[in-house]
Amino acid sequence: MKKANGIVLDKPGKPDYRTPASFRIIVLLETVSKILERLSALRLAAAARSLGLLHPNQCGSLAGLGCFDAVATLTHEVRLLQAASFKVSTLFLDVKGGFDNVCANKLASILAKGGVSAYLVAWIKSFLSGRQCRLIFQGAPKVFCPVAVGTPQGSPISPLLFVLYVASLHPTIPQGLAISYFDDLTITVSSDTVSSNIRALQYFFGVIQRRGANLVVAFSVPKTELIHWRTPKDRSDVSFAPIVINDMFFPPSQAVRWLGYWLTPTIHSSVHFLRRLALAKASFTSIRQLSAAGKGLSSWCNRKLVFGASLPILTYGCDLFVPDAATLKKLNSFWHVVLRRTTNCFYTTALGALYREASLPPISSICKHRRRSATLRLVCAPSEFNPATARIPESVPTWDQGRSADDHRFLLRGSSKAVHLTSWLGLAVNSAKHLPLDSLCHEVSDLIEEISILPLASTDLVAQPLSRVPSVTYQALRTPLIQSLLADWLDISPPVPSCYPYGACLTPHAFTGLPRFICGRIHQMRSGASYLAAHISWRNRDSSTLCPFCEEDNESFQHAVLHCPAKTHPRLTHLSGVHDIGPDGPLWLSVPLLRGFAEYLYATRTGFPRAMLRI
């Protein structure tokens, strides 16, 4: 179980692929070995939390800690220090080689000194020792070679071992903080001038570098980035003061990508969402190639691809950032193209009906829902293990009232220079008067202000027995979020046509599993923008609305399916028993009836383009 195959993958976006640093080795392990590693990782995580082996500002590799928590903590502290009238600067660092530099003996010594059980220390030391790996690529010799240092990248326990190994790198910074996510580390300092910040950053980088040398851990200095934060209303001259590290010159950046979030000096969201929009367009281009209009994957499969690929790319970061009006307009424009492509609806389809046909809400509703979901998880997490939870207002009814030792909210108390901040229970959210985490708590104030103790998001986050039992459960708090998503969808959605009777739902319609062409006909006829003669648009506004088959009545959806005398025989053959196509009719919930409906549309060419009609 100590032998593994290493798959060599190229890192995207590298300018030169002639160096080994441009590639990543992912280790494929034995299944039984991965099960054992997962079990050991769970035991080690519980021991690390109970023994305090992790730094409070470390994120990643543990349950309940992710990129959102790290970025939320950073932006909150930046805004808080700015509210105290300080100049704030941050240095972004990257550990070189990360997983490859973990020394088994040093890690075992750290764990043993921290009080981890001897059997678990021995298991980890054995896991990291005597390993062999062979690289798999074209022309490789395919022979196993010994691996002296490092943890296998791809193992369930490797991220946790690395986080424990580098926990001592985080220094204590007065009026600042050091926060990390795996091998991405940031140093934030504040003072009255930018030049003082640069000197402080150089000093603390030297401290971290010396600590890393003791662990045989180095930093990839060329990847270092610097940012001088500004408030949106700051009218002073923009500082371009650089920093010199290891004889390398680093000017301040105007946009830094950290953990997938694009950060600007004013923490404006437009840069982040425009980058996400470009990535979402690229992913949707690949999805479009799988299905041409009217053929290819079914609408159900297309919706699943959009919901699982394009939407997460587009809305990544909306749990913390709120898009402004101009950016939201661009996001909506792309989202409408996605929904039309998914449902095969026309561009003349009313947006209110388009959202309901696709069973997907508007982007603004999705962003708000994900912010509320992330905030609910945040306030239900223990402040002892989550750096963002440890910085929310003390009046929020969290599980425990502990707060982080390096939380600088106290700087605002009694300070003559401090900006007056609005309470999280205020009537409205204002980014200029609310701290980031305070505004997030405001998002869920309607759910938590009447609760005395919020439940834990997961009981696995604590090792000790729970001493207090909340009156509600975490899942019970999540249920109203879905209801509020639907309510918000109905509030902000454009109006639906008066002839559209179908309601909004978050689950795909049953008929979306039908072939893509016929499913598109159904979407079009339901939405009121189709090839039926009675569905008037700017293209056929002068055409006759009479049914081309019987020429007795207007060709509406009801007439074409239920009342056209020219289609009586196919109707009796395929739609016997169907007398209602409204939202309460049995047709939309019965798979056999939907199959018969599809056969009826094929047989009668209902809703087909006029060039395909048989009259």
Image: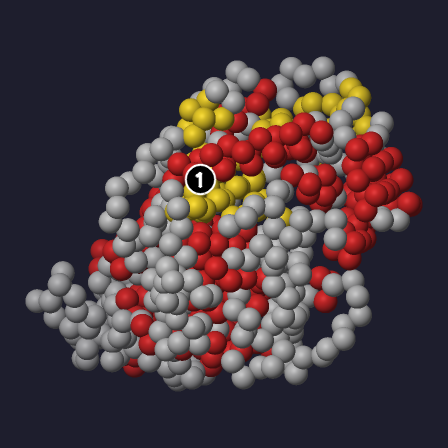
Residue at the spot 28% in from the left edge and 66% down from the top edge: 351
| Quadrant (top left/top right/bottom left/bottom right) for the C terminus | bottom left
Q: How is the image coloured?
A: secondary structure
Q: Find residue 417 and report its image quarter.
A: bottom left
Nearer-the-camera pick, 384 or 458: 384
Q: To which residue does mark 1 refer?
A: 197
Q: Is residue 374 visible?
A: no
SS for callout 1: helix
| Quadrant (top left/top right/bottom left/bottom right) for the N terminus | top right
For residue 110, side relative to residue 379 (left or right): right
Q: Position of residue 399 (x, y in %)?
A: 65, 72
Task: Check disc 1 and give the amino acid type.
Answer: Asn
For residue 11, side relative to residue 336 (left or right): right
How many marks the image carries: the answer is 1
Q: Position of residue 488 (x, y in %)?
A: 38, 74
* Picture layout, residue 444 above or below residue 86: below
* Picture layout, residue 157 above or below residue 614: above
Q: Position of residue 48 (x, y in %)?
A: 76, 51
* Picture layout, residue 68 above or below residue 160: below
Q: Residue furthest right?
A: 119
* Disc 1 packing (10 Å; few <14; some 14–19; many ≥20): many
Q: Position of residue 64 (x, y in %)?
A: 63, 58
For residue 422, side relative to residue 171 (left or right): left
Residue at the spot 46% in from the left edge and 42% down from the top edge: 90
Q: Find residue 158 and report its image quarter.
A: top right
Q: Residue furthest left?
A: 542
Residue at the spot 19% in from the left edge and 80% down from the top edge: 553
Nearer-the-camera pick, 259 or 485: 259
Residue at the spot 30% in from the left edge and 58% down from the top edge: 324
Nearer-the-camera pick, 231 or 582: 231
Q: Is residue 157 visible?
A: yes
